Image (cartoon, coloured by chain):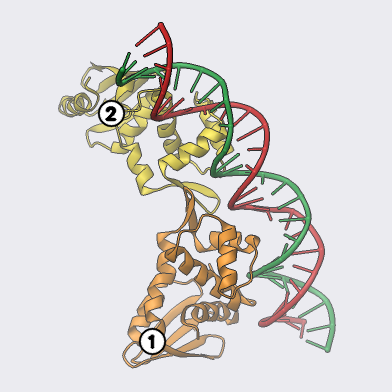
Chain colours: A yellow, B orange, C green, D red
Amino acid sequence: MLRPMTDSTDTSARRSLLAKILRERTIERQAELVEVLRKRGHRATQSSVSRDLRELGVAKLGRRYVLTDEAARSIGDFSALRPFVTSRVTAGANLTVLKTKIGTAQSVAVAIDAAAWPEVVGTLSGDDTIFIATRGAREQRCLCERLLAIFGR
Amino acid sequence: MLRPMTDSTDTSARRSLLAKILRERTIERQAELVEVLRKRGHRATQSSVSRDLRELGVAKLGRRYVLTDEAARSIGDFSALRPFVTSRVTAGANLTVLKTKIGTAQSVAVAIDAAAWPEVVGTLSGDDTIFIATRGAREQRCLCERLLAIFGR
DNA sequence: ACAGCGGATGCATTTTTATGCAGCATGGCT
DNA sequence: AGCCATGCTGCATAAAAATGCATCCGCTGT
């Protein structure tokens, strides 16, 4: 029980996404988050969001919600995301594709972006797929090593 | 920032006190602050406290209110310098003079410069005197309110 | 001296948040 | 399998925070 195995799949994904949203735009109330989450395929109520924010270490400063250092850190935490990634494939020397469980791609991508690895040029994610661009073979190798170490795939 | 022009004396004092309280103990709701303030001789309602907190840059993290780095800095740093300032006098609408204990003027001036208050055009300090230039009466008033709140003079 | 401004407040209320309370699903144990 | 403990939810509701409005005050400019 090293991990909250229960329904954590959706929970973790939602929280990661929540963090990302907070970095991207100004949010002034939990109801907004519920709305945004819904648009990105997550179903949640204000109740859950309220709990998530506390769990994430998000603070409300003035009118807006802001990520704290702790929260930012949790984004870069791959441990919770590990079970989401189901496979990794390379397509040429510039593209690496990660397959994830439905609806979790965004969350994983967020963490990868946050990590800001030098070999990664950019990422693009859908519902269950993440494209990771690298400059060349050398970089791709570097990336794959990391991914393997982190996700075991 | 703090442009209490009116009876700001009390306002600023209250806000400073508010910050102090937040540094000293854990506060979970505005009603508590109202209570504590009252005990220390300040009369205020939850409405005012709500506004004060926003103004001060205080955030609510989880259940408790916490001072932002900025908030803590703006008030904390001066506390140590407070005993150095012995008096304040204005000379026209553009010049405010602070008298300090011998040899401490520089220190105080540095702090004032660092604060980078918008109403301050510039400062010049000697051994026991600090000249603070302001653009006009309004700015000077703003400045004096700050000084009064911080140094009690 | 008077009219006008802008900041600051309190009050009454509206908005937002936080939570007590089941209800479920999952994992571990006996 | 039968049970219990744990974690996560939504709902309904309590609790807390934000705000519209009317008012006051002190300062400015005429």
| Residue A137 vs residue A77, the one in the foreground | A77
Vertical arrangement, residue D22 with respect to residue D29, above or below: above
Q: Locate residue D2 relative to residue B49 in the image: left or right.
A: left
**Would you name the residue on which mark 1 appears?**
B84
Residues at marks 1 and 2, common chain? no
Mark nearer the viewer, 1 or 2: 2
Tell me the residue at 28%/32% (across/down): A121
Vertical arrangement, residue B40 with respect to residue A142, above or below: below
Tell me the residue at 65%/60% (across/down): B47
Q: Locate residue B139 relative to residue A153 in the image: left or right.
A: right
Vertical arrangement, residue A111 with respect to residue A152, above or below: below
Chain containing the residue with disc 2:
A
- Quadrant in the rendering for residue D28: bottom right
Q: Position of residue C9 (x, y in %)?
A: 67, 68
Query: Mark 2 is on which residue type?
Result: Leu
Chain containing the residue with disc 1:
B
Q: Position of residue A123 (x, y in %)?
A: 33, 28
